[in-house]
Amino acid sequence: MKILFATSECVPFVKTGGLADVCGALPKQLKKQGAEVRVVLPLYRDVQPKWREQMEHLTYFYVNLGWRRQYCGIEMLKLDGVTFYFIDNEFYYNRPSVYGWGGDEGERFAFFDRAVLEMLPLIDYKPDVLHCHDWQTGLIPVLLKRQYAALPFYNGIHTVFTIHNLQYQGVFGMDYIEDLMGFGWDAYTSDKLEFFGAASFMKGGLVYTDEITTVSPTYASEIQTAYYGERLDGLLRARRESLTGILNGIDTDEYNPSKDPLIEERYNVVTQGKRKAVNKAALQQQLGLEVRPDVPLIGIVSRLTSQKGLDLVERVLPEIMSMDVQLVVLGMGEEKYVNLFNWAAHRYQGKVASWNQMNHELAHRIYAGCDMFLMPSAFEPCGLSQIISLRYGTVPIVRETGGLKDTVPAFNPVTGEGMGFTFYSYNAHDMLDAIRRAVTTYREDKKSWRKLIGNGMRGDYGWAASAKKYMELYNKLVPEQTVDLGDEKPAKPEKAE
């Protein structure tokens, strides 16, 4: 089984969110299950020299985007048994940020999508399944079905399209996309790419792909409703027989408190009591908080956006702080939330710490040092932070939505079952009640608190079970006996003189 992941980001090379974690960890697990997995992504400026130095230049060619004719280099690197290809074009990808700089996002990823298909015969690699991730790759299934299917080399390539976050859809003008891609105007109807008078990369992927997945079973159900469906719920209901929710895992080697080199003192489920306290004290000291072992320390590691439920925190922040707790926030995002937590750090000196940056080491120390982890999202396709916090014995407080509902069963003090404190309605005082229940349990019911920590740390959060489900999906698409096309290939794109 040959599988090619097409993604706009992937660890350890470039990361802005959970998409990168998935595309870095899942291929390694699929390889363990017998698949040959390769990954293709853009060669951004953010890719560090230590990776660039290991790359091998394979070839180059030119990609036609309407009247544009753009250089495309293919660089290759092998890491942990997985082959990575990098699409090299400095005009599109040598920029200060991965996304949103230059005002031509549609063109950047239209180029990427066509380049992915154009490179395949040149590198002599034909995947059985081309697995596309999020809107940036949404035109790959469209191109494959509308423009490449008649070419013998591409015959038999199947596609899977994964929704990581339906809110981001890649919506641009129809004239703009047609000028770049030349699909023909019959592609811009309501049953294809047309989306409320514009054209949508995401919708194109959902219409033309063979199978659709998303990153948790609950989110797969939620997005078929008007509330969560981002105006694509009708299409998703129509394709529900091809829609599967498969829960994300985490890289259990990287996120392992018994081996983590980034935390103050390593621990496991047996030794966590005193050793987790050492991590807490070190974190408090590092962040300028009062070093108190008795105070509940609540962590937030997140993009600072409305999606993450931070308006609920804003609404009841004084009530939260009145419980005599400490709060540490790590993340970047919307200015109003950056200002909120910076103000809180000034207003509640010694009790609130706010770091507005992407800091991988500090994130690990927060997971290890906090007692509780707050994640009150308005919606959450899967979420990884709550899973990592469970792995580190930090008790989650979450809203029952998407992957949060699937991964954090509510604690039942009678039976001792469950892993965290949850609330259902998107309501600030319901969240406040969940925080109050967590703080009360922490202070007054040490036996239940130890049970909660143990339940969380003993969970299985790796990729093995989810990778098996992906393999089942791939096997459903690819027949057992494939037709041998021999050496028949389309003409290679013209190289430079």
Image (spheres, rainbow, N blue to C red):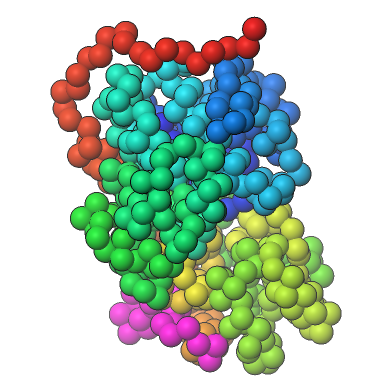
Residue 63 image-quadrant placement: top right
> From the viewer's perspective, is residue 301 above or below residue 97?
below
Query: Percent position (x, y) of residue 451?
Result: 42, 72
> From the viewer's perspective, is residue 102 above or below residue 448?
above
Q: Which quadrant would the N terminus be assigned to in this image?
A: top left
Query: Percent position (x, y) of residue 33?
Result: 31, 33
Residue 94 image-quadrant placement: top right
- Please tell me which residue is depicted at 62% across the width and 51% down the height of the picture: 16
> From the viewer's perspective, is residue 186 above or below residue 264?
above
- Please tell me which residue is depicted at 49% across the width and 57% down the height of the picture: 198
Q: Which residues are magenta?
A: 404-429
Residue 382 image-quadrant placement: bottom left
Query: Percent position (x, y) of residue 254?
Result: 55, 45
Q: Is residue 335 visible?
A: yes
In the image shown, does 53 or 126 lie closer to the viewer?
A: 126
Magenta run includes residue 91: no
Query: Quick check: 12 left or right of 53?
Result: left
- Please tell me which residue is depicted at 30% across the width and 19% down the height of the picture: 152
Q: Which quadrant would the C terminus be assigned to in this image?
A: top right
Query: Percent position (x, y) of residue 62?
Result: 58, 21
In the image shown, does 108 or 196 lie closer to the viewer?
A: 196
